Image: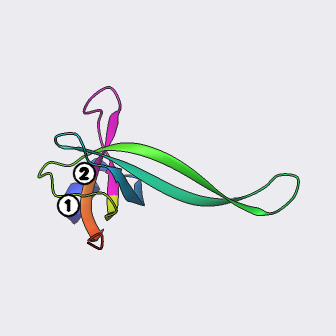
Amino acid sequence: MEQQEASRGKRNQKVGRVTSAAMQKSVVVAVDRLVQHPFYGKTVRRTSTFMAHDENNECKIGDKVLIMESRPISRRKRWIVQEVLEKAKE
């Protein structure tokens, strides 16, 4: 694993929740981040969504996953599901 990262360089990774798994080999992952409001100073939650490639169709809605940047796989997919960190509660 470390040899692959050394040859590819440092790739961006994010942790998020799966919001849609209706497609084959694809999931939509929502990543939350906290930013400070520019005028009021209050901390506000911002959400970004990413399409990610799920080779084995193992992700379900609500799973917490680690995604990694990759080459473009399709028009909107530029991320790969690295691992499922936490399964959704039934």
**Quarter of image, res 65:** bottom left
Q: Is residue 30 left or right of residue 37?
A: left
At which x and y percent is residue 9?
33, 51
Residue at 24 percent of width and 43 percent of height: 22
User: Tag 1: residue type?
Assistant: Gln
Name the image quarter holding residue 1.
Answer: bottom left
Residue found farthest to the top: 75
Which residues lie in the magenta part?
Answer: 67-80
- Label 1 packing within 10 angstroms: few (<14), some (14-19), many (20+): few
Q: Nearer the viewer, residue 11 or 52?
A: 52
Residue 82: x and y in percent read: 25, 58
Q: Position of residue 5 (x, y in %)?
A: 27, 57
- 75 or 4: which is nearer to us? 75
Q: Which element is circle 2 on?
A: helix
> Given the image, on which type of amino acid does mark 2 rest?
Ser
Residue at 39%, 60% in the rendered image: 17
Q: Is residue 10 visible?
A: no
Instruction: For the residues labelled 1 and 2, say whether their Cβ atoms are less than 8 Å apart.
Output: yes
Q: Which residue is mark 1?
A: 3
* Quadrant of image for the C terminus: bottom left
Q: Residues within 10 Å of mark 2 (few under 14, many from 20)?
A: few
Residue to which mark 2 is pinned: 7
Above or below, 48 relative to 63 = above
Comparing 72 with 65, the one in front is: 65
